[in-house]
Amino acid sequence: MAGYALGLSEVKIYVVSASLLILWLALLTNIFGLSIAKWTNNAGALATYTFGILLIVLGFTVWMRSGSATPIRLAPHWDMDKVNFWSQIAFAFGGLELGAILGGEIRNPARNVPRAAWISGAAIAAFYILGTLSLLVLMPPDRISILTGLVQASTEAGARLHSAYVAPAMIVLILIGVSGQLCAWIGGTARIPFVIGIDHYFPPAFARLHPRWGTPHLAILTQGIACTFFVVALQAGESLRVGYQLLVDMTVIVYFIPFLYMFAAAWKYGRKWSAAMGLTVTVISIVVSLIPPGDARSLWLFEGKLLAGCAILVASARVMFKFALRRSHTLTK
């Protein structure tokens, strides 16, 4: 998105390098602990909601002055090239489980986590529904890029309202918001290999905290190395648009697999309605993630990369688990 603002949105070396730079800055922030990272997280949340409110206000203002750039229809237009996006709608509601992962670092989690779930769920739904309407008011869908659509809409709003300040302000908010979200995800997911290390299913080094900052630094650094590998590998031989879609699809598939276990357990323990709805959404999201976008250069290359990336992660976990069981059996003897 910053690349689009600078006229470099299609320069792959710039986009990949800038993305990796932001990734490693977020990683280092988390190594310093939540006392530092929480400010990045809070700034990102504030910037995201500020941007969302401004986008909705701008869209409404343009609609009142000059009408909508897109005819608004409530019924969706079915297009196989866009089916893949439905999984990302479900993925947009993910992240609430980080509250449980960080439960030991949240004040009064029994009260605050459920409250945060209801508030954030409603806010996410409102943001996506009203934000999408605003985008369609500002621009027709065939001009909106999956990569830079928010920046495009901000630029268009500034032009339609004859304001030179709208686009730069919105772009800054987007960058702060995305960086904050990235920082929050890194901090939350790093606790998982840390806990697995405590349970001896990962090497003991993962269970060690940084002597000064008290953070699971090895888990954070390992996460950074893995992310760097996948960003570079999935972009190779693809356009930025398709490379981005590969990253998203692989993330959705691997991310939702544990949800199958979670909702199955909920069914077993009597929460059948919520479990049934959760399982339905999860299975559909995984299946539609396997459908390639229409502009993929090669169906086989896209599917091969996607399935290979998922297989690498699943196989790595299986190997680590079997190794841990063998080591545990040897120590028992």
Image: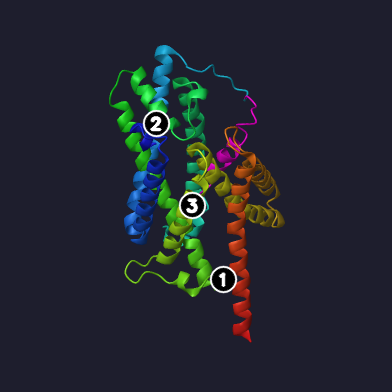
Say which residue label 3 marks. 113
Quadrant including the N terminus: top left
Q: Mark 3, mark 2: which one is toward the viewer?
A: 2
Q: CA distance from mark 3 to mark 1?
A: 28 Å
**Could you say where residue 173 lies in the image, as x and y percent from the top left?**
34, 37
Say which residue label 1 marks. 201
Dot 3: few (<14), some (14–19), or many (≥20) neighbours within 10 Å? Answer: some
Residue positioned 40% across, 37% down in the render: 11
Say which residue label 2 marks. 151
40 left or right of 108 in image: left
Residue at the extreme bottom of the image, as rendered: 333
Q: Amino acid at mark 1?
A: Tyr
**Could you say where residue 97 lies in the image, as x and y percent from the top left?**
53, 53
User: Does residue 45 appear anywhere in the picture?
Assistant: no
Secondary structure found at label 1: loop
Q: CA distance from mark 1 to mark 2?
A: 43 Å
Q: Earlier in the sequence, mark 1 or mark 2?
A: 2
Q: Which range is magenta? A: 77-95
- Tell me, yes or no, whether the highlighted magenta stretch contains residue 260: no
Within the image, what quadrant is residue 325 found in? bottom right
Within the image, what quadrant is residue 154 found in? top left
Residue at the extreme left of the image, as rendered: 164
Dot 2: few (<14), some (14–19), or many (≥20) neighbours within 10 Å? Answer: many
Q: Mark 3, mark 1: which one is toward the viewer?
A: 1
User: Does residue 1 appear anywhere in the picture?
Assistant: yes
Residue positioned 53% across, 39% down in the render: 242
Q: Amino acid at mark 2?
A: Val
**Could you say where residue 223 lies in the image, as x and y percent from the top left?**
46, 59
